[in-house]
Amino acid sequence: MREASRRLPSLPWRDLAPVVGYANRLECRPGETFGPRCISDYQLLYVAEGKGEVTVQETARQCEAGDLFFYGPGVPHRIRADRRDPFVLYGVHYLWQGPLPEPGRPPQITIRQLGSAEKLPYRDNRFLIGEDMTGDLLLLDGHRRVPPKRFEPFFARLAEAWPSQRATTPLLLRSLLTELLVELHASAAGGDGEGDGPLVQRLAERLRRHAAERYDRDWLSSWTSYHPDYISRLFRSRMRQTPYAYFMSCKLELAREALAHTGEPLAAMAERLRFSSVHAFTRWFVRQTGMPPGRFRRASRTI
């Protein structure tokens, strides 16, 4: 086993310095297909909702929420959403190492579409983080199942952070992806599979359902019968963010989904999401994503 591990592309944990080139969340159309194609970097593809088929090289899998795929440069793959219950996907393109790019100038991603009869040489689609098979290793080998409640928040945070033009964004993306990889290692090593207690999960679900409203801190006590300070600390320890931050991330998700998949006017969207004006909505959206709503709408159709 140790001899085999040395033949794999690998990187010690201490040398891990990922550079995120692109991250987003995409609601696929019924039957929508990407590929067959190959890319110039690495990608983690996470299924958040829905069903479909993902083919990596010659292996096709029928998948659903919790399926996580990994593939690297030159590995052919195809993504096809179900016609009745299409995918909601998170995609993260990255390199394992490199200097951080300037804000607003992410690394270039090359996506090559393959002809129906084109065949590429088989590649060993595995990558090992660590140095010895007896140590703390993470082996990425094409596909694995992960607990959705535990891992979707990582991908959501990456997708939310990527559009920002702030000077700190490239570093934030690096830290978020590193945290995700460490969590994958912990999960593979037999850590807590769910990560979220039932009470916190119920609160998170209710916050998500009310995301179009104005935030009310009294919800924390009326929905749980605990003091708001206590439940807020518990929520933060489980979800890695405060209830308010989670609520606003859900509101941002509503805005992003509407911009990507509807023609709803900005003024109507601002009113529906309980902003005082379209200008307040636009300022908030720019602070969260680094781009105006109209520009986000135009750039949203890719993975």
Image: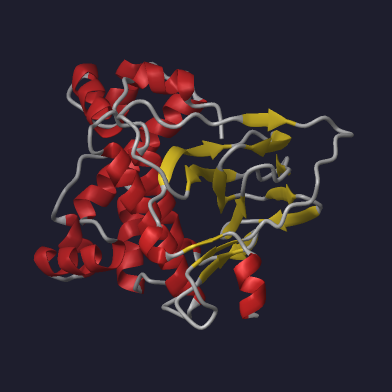
* Residue 6 location, quadrant: bottom right
Q: Does residue 301 sit above or below 214 in this rendering?
A: above
Quadrant holding the N terminus? bottom right
- At 56% from the left edge and 35% from the top edge, which residue is drawn? 303
Residue 14 in view:
yes
* Residue 60 location, quadrant: bottom right
x, y percent for residue 232 = 17, 63
- At 40% from the left edge and 32% from the top edge, which residue is drawn? 256
Position of 245 with respect to 191 (left or right) is left
x, y percent for residue 23 = 45, 39
| Foreground residue among 180 and 286 | 180
Position of 49 with respect to 246 (left or right) is right
Q: Residue furthest bottom?
A: 134
* Residue 168 location, quadrant: top left
Q: Does residue 153 sit above or below 263 in this rendering?
A: below
Q: Does residue 275 sit above or below 84 in this rendering?
A: above
Residue 212 in view:
no
Position of 86 with respect to 95 (left or right) is right
| Foreground residue among 68 and 125 | 125
Image mark count: 0
x, y percent for residue 133 = 55, 79
Q: Residue furthest right?
A: 117
x, y percent for residue 144 = 61, 64
User: Is the image coloured rainbow, by chain, by secondary structure, or in one colour?
Assistant: secondary structure
Position of 117 with respect to 89 (left or right) is right
- At 56% from the left edge and 67% from the top edge, which residue is drawn? 139
